[in-house]
Amino acid sequence: MDAVLDFFAEAFGDPASYMSKRPGADYLRSLLGGDSFIALAALEGDKVTGALCAYELRKFEQERSEIYIYDLAVAATHRRQGIATALIGSLQDIAAARGAWVIFVQADTAPEDEAAIALYSKLGVREEVLHFDIPVNRTSG
């Protein structure tokens, strides 16, 4: 998992999020040992060339789940080789085996996400939604 965290830090240009407060071994063991987290990596030898992390969200209204792709990246040197499509294909197999009814992902409208939007448009149906971050700590007022 350290190699995947290093990979995401570089791919997203965000070392603060992926490197500054690494989870401990017990936390990772618990996360990886549970049934809600899915981690996939594409390797060339022992080097990560692509990675996908997703979460299974079990629903209450029906006995089914949704899979949320949280992080997906491919090394700049390995793009346009089908790695992201293969990672999503593997996730589709996992989702089907788990009885999930949909996989969803969000993408920014920033120019640097155009390739991701093109990929997701090829694989799925685009929905226009708004995303809100709600802080955990309540503010009075």
Image: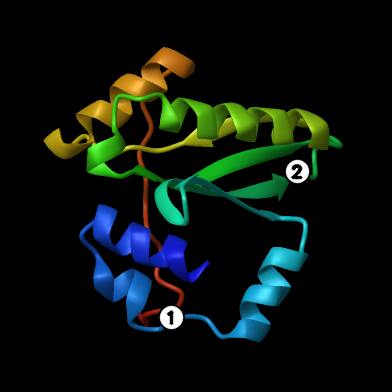
Whether residue 99 appears in this view of the structure is no
Task: Tell me residue 72's x, y (percent).
Answer: 42, 44
Neighbourhood count class around disc 1 (C-alpha, 10 Å): few under 14, some 14–19, many 20 upward: few
N-terminal-most mark, 2 or 1:
2
Residue 26 visible in the shown view: yes
Q: Which residue is mark 1?
A: 137
Q: Is residue 47 left or right of residue 114?
A: right
Q: Which residue is mark 2?
A: 59
**Whole-percent x and y of residue 126?**
41, 19
| Relative to 39, 132 lies left or right | left
Q: Residue at x 27, y 75 (%)?
A: 16
Specify whether 78 is left or right of 22.
Answer: left
Mark 1 lies on a secondary structure that is loop
Q: Position of residue 22 (x, y in %)?
A: 45, 81
| Whole-percent x, y for residue 80 in the image | 30, 24
Q: Is residue 83 above or below residue 71?
A: above
